[in-house]
Amino acid sequence: MDRGAAVNSALKTARTLITGGHVLTMDPALGELLSADVLIENGSIRAVGQTIDAPDADVIDASSMIVMPGFVDTHRHTWQTAVRHCYADVDPLQYFAEMLGPVGAAYRPEDVRIGTLLGALSALDAGITTLVDWSHCMNTPDHADAAVDALTESSIRAVFAHGWPLAPEWTRDSALPHPADLRRLRESRFSAPDQLLTLAMAARGPEMARSEVWLGDLRLARDLGIRSTVHVGAYAHNARHRAVAQLRDAGVLGPDLTFVHCSRSAADEIAMIADAGASISLGVHCELNSAGMGDIPLDRILAAGLRPSLSGDTETKCSGDMFTQMRLLLGYYRSWTGGGHSRVPDPPFLGVRDVLEFATLAGARAAGLDSQTGSLSPGKRADLILLRATDLNLAPVTDPAAAVVLAAHPGNVDTVLVGGRTVKRHGRLLATGLPAVLELAEHSRRRVLATIATQRTATA
Ligand SMILES: [Zn+2]
């Protein structure tokens, strides 16, 4: 019996039993279970196993489903979602000159809000239950509040990574410390212990700020008890700073840091990240689409003993969905290493289960949330997705992990739960007001594109 409708109508269901699915737990101790049940109690996973007896639970029939943890996206500039795909065919440096320059500077709080809301909702729709929102359009405190409001409204689990205002003095040899608004946010919006949102610093680091500044920024984040995430090593002009080495030399490299891209980071810097227990986020599709950025250094990362996380980066020039990141990474790595391009002597084998781990458990670790999400482990929050194994692009399923990595897409995502709350069921998001979200996004899109056009005319 499928009593999904009853589940949907409840904000929190006391007990839900997901029955008979092919369960990819991503928990090394539990592995993969054929025709197994998952019991959810008060938003957390209570048990995973064959034939769980819970007569009072609401039941979700998963007998034709692959059940797995929701994906974790560890770096997305969600605020840009309303202008998706507008940098498809231009020099990637134009994106930086415009979006992270005058165009971003002209973003209003409502542009940040609707971009972030649409991005978070579409992430949920695609099975991403945790999102590190890399929000570097913090022109005013109202922009920060708009982003936090949008993440809250979406019901996604998110790390709000608070960045800086988009003006040159913040990113070129900057002498300005991270906006003090971060402290206000910590106290006024992130003090409740049991919420879906946590706060982080989207830091500029040694590639953008002076040493006394990035040292002070890091101190601030640690004073506030929050993680930091920083772009490093993308493009030669950034990599020459050897940002990771600078942090190591300053004695501040630590496990609370996530480094984004590392495309041209030297091998010794990757080893420093591993030694410090820090993490890496690979924005695979955007990295492949951005000529000049550098390689995806997965061979070096794996050789250093690191397990990278994956991310959608900016949807202005790629797809944000995790299926795309996984599939491209696997193909890229096999082509790269198989073609003899690897810079490590014996590049490790990369299998579909490795890639699935990057997109889930490794992502949860990079987000600082692995005690809560990333695997279907008893005690963790019930962030999970059901994929229809009977869809024509997947059936008949021989190896569920391979099916997910090689062939699945967001349209196969039937059901999504975040903290036990159903946010997508029978292939449809349950959020109300989606037409209004799209309408507001269209207004924002037109306005931002007009700003881009004006900017291009002015610089022509
Ligand atoms: Zn980025």
Image (tube, rainbow, N blue to C red):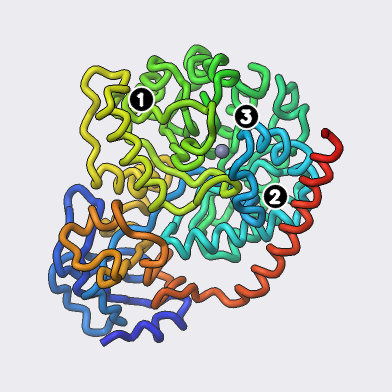
- From the top left corner, tell me how far across and down residue 61 is, in percent: 26, 79
Residue at image coords 30%, 65%: 393
Residue at image coords 41%, 30%: 296
Q: Amino acid at mark 3?
A: Arg
Q: Mark 3 vs mark 1: which is more N-terminal? A: 3
Q: Amino acid at mark 1?
A: Ala
Q: Secondary structure at mark 3?
A: loop
Tell me the CA gap for discs 3 and 1: 21 Å
Return the residue at label 1.
Answer: 274
Q: Is residue 21 left or right of residue 60?
A: left
Tell me the CA gap for discs 1 and 2: 32 Å
Return the residue at label 2.
Answer: 144
- From the top left corner, tell me how far across and down residue 444 is, in percent: 74, 59
Return the residue at label 3.
Answer: 204
Residue at image coords 54%, 39%: 226
- From the top left corner, tell me how far across and down residue 439 is, in percent: 70, 70
Q: Give the quadrant of the N terminus.
A: bottom left
Q: Is residue 81 left or right of residue 264?
A: right
